[in-house]
Image: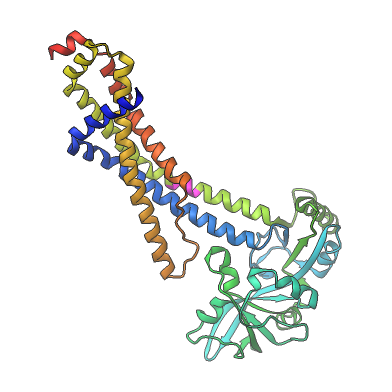
Amino acid sequence: MLLDYFRIALGNLTRRKLRSWLTMIGIFIGIMAVVGLISLSQGMENALLSEFKKLGTNRIVISPGGAAMGPVGGALTPTKFTEEDYNTVKKIRGIDMSASVYSASAYLTFGKQTKQEMVWGFPFDSARIEFYKTQSMFDIGEGRLLRPSDKYKAMIGWGTANELFDKRIKVGNKIYINGVEFEVVGIHKKIGGLAGTASDNMVRIPKSAAREIFNKPDEVSAIFLRVKDGYSVDDVAERIKRKLRNFRDVKEGEEDFSVQTSAQVIAAFEQILGVVQAVLVGLAAISLLVGGIGIMNTMYTSVVERTKEIGIMKSVGARNSTIMIIFLIESGLLGAVGGAIGVALGLGIGKVAEVIAMQFDITSLQAYTGLPLIFGALLFAFIVGAIAGTLPAIQASKLHPVDALRK
């Protein structure tokens, strides 16, 4: 029976091809915009979250002054860390590996050009070097990692090597950091995307050299920790907060430091992208409202044109519910067919945007083409069409057969 309703509704639409196509324009434009935006925003979210998760979910970063995770120089934070802060937390139960680092913006000179770049001083003892080898941000594309015996040697990010200066920096070249000569021994692989921007555009040198050229013998910009397997990252983070509050003599809620886990960073990132996605989809959905009004108008016109047909159907036994279902299916099909066209166009736009982004090395802009998006958009379009056709369907179902046959 339901199949017959669909057949009747489809036949009515094909008899009025031009009107049906014109009605579907509003729907497929709206669905195209929604699908295109969701495809790109979801694809970008998946790509960026994948980059973050490569760093591991058992990491903790401690920053002074409540600063967020990132390449923030010590001079930019309102409070400071010292090696005493680091010594306070590095032996807390559950910590497997730790490192205190110092960072600052410096004048980087290569050839006759001088630019500002973020310089990070890392400890490079044997144990930590093995740890760095497991981190994607330390992957070497050319040359090698720094060694414990290195002093005035440097590793640079892909962006620093290839984009900062007019001439490309190569392994073995000499660069000057605040006037001090360093030899480039390694160039990192390109990470790309928003999550990799900081690593692609930085210089890493031994911490002892950083303390010397910046004249900061005891200051710490950030503390990186890895939690042992079997320990809760959140529990370890809470122990760190309690220990630092006692050491720095601050009350709970008034901390002058920030303790962030990888999971917290990922969750905050997902929340931000979710809000952005909701706003974009909300704006695009306005055109769906226009499309729904178009379907309603078409279905009202259809009721007027087919009044006699409705009277005949009722006179041979069709119930009000039957007439209503046929009109609802008809309006739903208008939405679904328009939605199918919109989905195809929206996914196409997403793929085109991805290809264009790849030409500019924007690897984080990727189009998501999952089945949940496709079927969800089609179902949504059908529902929009059915809702838009509800009032005309009710009007058609309430027509009296005798009055309808007189028309």
150 in relation to 260, above or below: below
In front: 181, or 19?
A: 19
Rendered view: 127 above or below 288: below
Q: Is residue 214 left or right of residue 246?
A: left
Q: Taken as a whole, is the magenta stretch helix, strand or loop? A: helix
Q: Which quadrant does the N terminus fall into? A: top left
Can residue 178 be seen in this snapshot?
A: no
Q: Nearer the viewer, residue 324 or 275?
A: 324
**Image point (65%, 59%), residue name:** 68
Circle count? 0
Residue 405 on image: x %, y %? 15, 12
Image quadrant in which you'd find residue 323: top left
The image position of residue 72, as x and y in percent, is 64, 67
- When the figure is inspected, residue 298 is found, relative to residue 39, above or below; the finding is above
Q: What range is drawn magenta here? A: 276-280
From the viewer's side, name the closer residue of 153 and 332.
332
Left or right? Give the position of 331 relative to 190: left
Residue at the (67%, 52%) spot, across then down: 264
Image x and y of residue 53, in percent: 63, 59
Report the side of 223 relative to 140 (left or right).
right
